Image (tube, grey):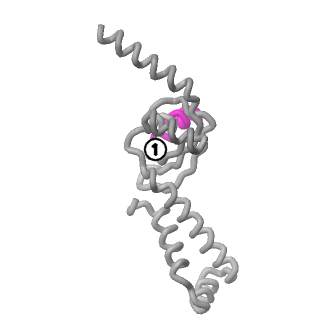
Amino acid sequence: MRNMNGIQFTRLVAEIHAGGMDDDLYDFLAASMDLTRSEIHEILERAELAWEELKELSSSFCLDHPLNAVNISNQMANNGCVTGVVMVSLDELISNDLEGFLDILSNRLIGNSLLQDVQYKVLSNHEDQLLIAVTGIVDENALAVEAYDLVIHRDENEN
């Protein structure tokens, strides 16, 4: 996360604002950026809100494997949706249509393509990797059917 400019720039601006700014600094920024003091204040407030959102998401930064069935069930029961942060390469993005991209997000988050009503937000990038917050709904009945099918296929392969 330390190398992801979008996250660190947002954090830096939010921390500067939280540390307090005097009138001279507001005036300097307004003059150098050709903005009003009000516009400077608005940018600082937006940075602080964005940083708070990033901090909230950081509890799930960044999944190195999909959520398991217990995590999925807990999130669905507590929040009515499943949320996590995943990495996707630009190559994966470019070589897929929207449906393929949504399947990648679903597979990274829950390990299959059963995620519905997928919403996503690019948080940052590092070189050719995008850090993406993903939210969606999992039909737990469909998840149970898939788990059952996996057990049946595993048992068939063992025999």
* Disc 1 target residue: 88
- Residue 41 colored magenta? no
Task: Give whichever of 73, 105 is nearer the camera.
Answer: 73
Q: Secondary structure at mark 1?
A: strand
Residue 79 location, quadrant: top right
- Residue 97 colored magenta? yes
Outermost residue toward the left in this view: 158
Q: Position of residue 122 (x, y in %)?
A: 54, 52
Q: Position of residue 31 (x, y in %)?
A: 63, 86
Task: Give whichever of 151, 88 is nearer the camera.
Answer: 151
Highlighted magenta segment, given as a residue range: 90-104
> Considering only vertical position in the picture, is 62 above or below 106?
below
Residue drawn at (35%, 12%) of the image: 155
Q: Position of residue 65 (x, y in %)?
A: 39, 40
**Apparent side of residue 141 relative to residue 112 in the rendered image (left or right):** right
The residue type indicated by label 1 comes to Val
Location of the C terminus by quadrant is: top left
Residue drawn at (56%, 44%) of the image: 78
Residue 95 is at least partly visible in this image: no
Q: Position of residue 114 (x, y in %)?
A: 54, 29
Residue drawn at (51%, 20%) of the image: 145
